Image: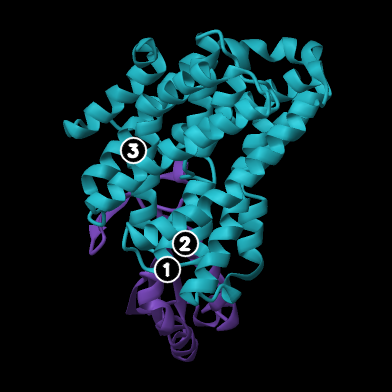
Chain colours: A purple, B cyan
Amino acid sequence: MVTTHPRKKIEILVDAPLLSRIQQLAKDAEVKGYTLQRTIGGEGGQGRWRAEEVTGGAGSKVVFATIVDEDTADRFLSDLEPLLSEYGLLVTVSPVEVIRGERF
Amino acid sequence: METLFSPVILFFVLGALAAFARSDLVFPEALSKALSIYLMCAIGLKGGVLVAGNGATVDLLLAAAAGLTLSMTIPLIGFFLLRGVGRLDPVNAAAVAAHYGSVSVVTFIAGDQLLSDAGLPPAGYMVAVLALMETPAIIVGLFLARRFGGADMATAGGSLWRETLLNGSVVLLVGSFVIGMIIGKPGFEPLTPVFETGFTGLLCLFLLDMGLLAARRLRNTRSLTVRLVAFAIIFPLLNGTLGVMIGGLLGLDVGTSTALGILGASASYIAVPAAMRLALPKADAGLYLTMSLAITFPFNITVGIPVYTAIAKWSV
């Protein structure tokens, strides 16, 4: 029987030019690692959007995904909260189980 | 009129029509990016090689001074027009104004091609003027946002300055311009099959993609008002006319004066949107991108460039 450990998965949809700020906040909150995912496009409150690298990425969005322990998640989310509306972030937090708990 | 039937413009119109007709035509993102890198390298090299042949002239310095003055003045005028006529809040007005003070590389490249086809090639040093005009408007825009909108850019920090000064398009343009100056005409000769012979065909492909992008953005926008659409057409016309007139007063030839007009009239949609998103996150990216990419860019490509050329022919 494999032992698993409960952790939090945080996913943030962020405009590509603002990604560096999220990375900095993650570093400040001592997030150990993260993965970036490209997006193709979507639709929301601001209308429909598509990934457009030609426009310097200003119209493109990236998904920043990380898995962290409860304390780190709290720190990171508290830092993110003031920026949610200004940066137009979409943040989701979900419970996950990991196998090598010391890594997250 | 013959400008409108140039293959470059026809491909742009084809892309726009395909997007309006909701065709499933899609350009792979990587190809679009590769084409934009190719075009910037090609235009930078071409300018550098021409300057290597002619040397640094008084005209170059005059055109550079005129370009810098335009790129710092246009955002100031644009800001107050957008506040008054456009009814935008200070932060959005500053962000949009910065786009109009900066330049569109693709509009310049298309203009350079159309002018060369018409036997009015602009001087090679205009590529250097183009690169010079990319960033000052960003600084003016940020100053306006802080002075009138109370925007706080402190958190943007070093990443903003890196984004502004080492923006990929500026690095490519300046870098390939310098390479062109170093290698000169003999060094450029072996590169001509890639950077000269294939240039117009690849520009057509790129403008096909730009037509798709511009029309899709226009179709999906929700933030435009009639006043802002009018601004995005009339303001470039005024700036283009001003640029052509200044070029004429400085004694530049018809093609070069027109190129200065095109630079004055064009609005950035590469360097400035990314910098503004970073520095002024409160500003509406959908607004400034749509105005510059979906209205001003198509207007300049189809109507503006022939108008600035006609004004230059008449006045210079």
Amino acid on which the number 1 mark rests in the picture: Pro
Q: Determine which quarter of the picture holds residue B199.
A: top right
Marks 3 & 1 on one chain = yes
Q: Viewed as shown, does residue A99 lie left or right of A92? A: right
The 10 Å Cα crowd at callout 3, few under 14, some 14 to 19, many 20 or more, is: many
Residue located 67% across and 50% down the image = B166
Residue located 70% across and 37% down the image = B64
Give the alpha-carbon distance from disc 3 to disc 1, as whole Å. 28 Å
Helix, strand or loop at mark 3: helix
Q: Nearer the viewer, mark 2 or mark 3?
A: 2
Q: Which mark is residue B90?
A: 1
Any part of residue B291 in sight: yes
Q: Determine which quarter of the picture holds residue B6.
A: top left
Residue A9 at x, y percent in the picture: 39, 76
Residue B192 at x, y percent in the picture: 66, 12
Specify the quadrant that holds the C terminus of chain B. top right
The 10 Å Cα crowd at callout 2, few under 14, some 14 to 19, many 20 or more, is: many
Q: In the rendered structure, are the residues bearing label 1 and label 2 in contact, judged by CB atoms less than 8 Å apart?
A: yes
Q: Which mark is residue B134?
A: none
The chain carrying label 1 is B
Marks 1 & 2 on one chain = yes
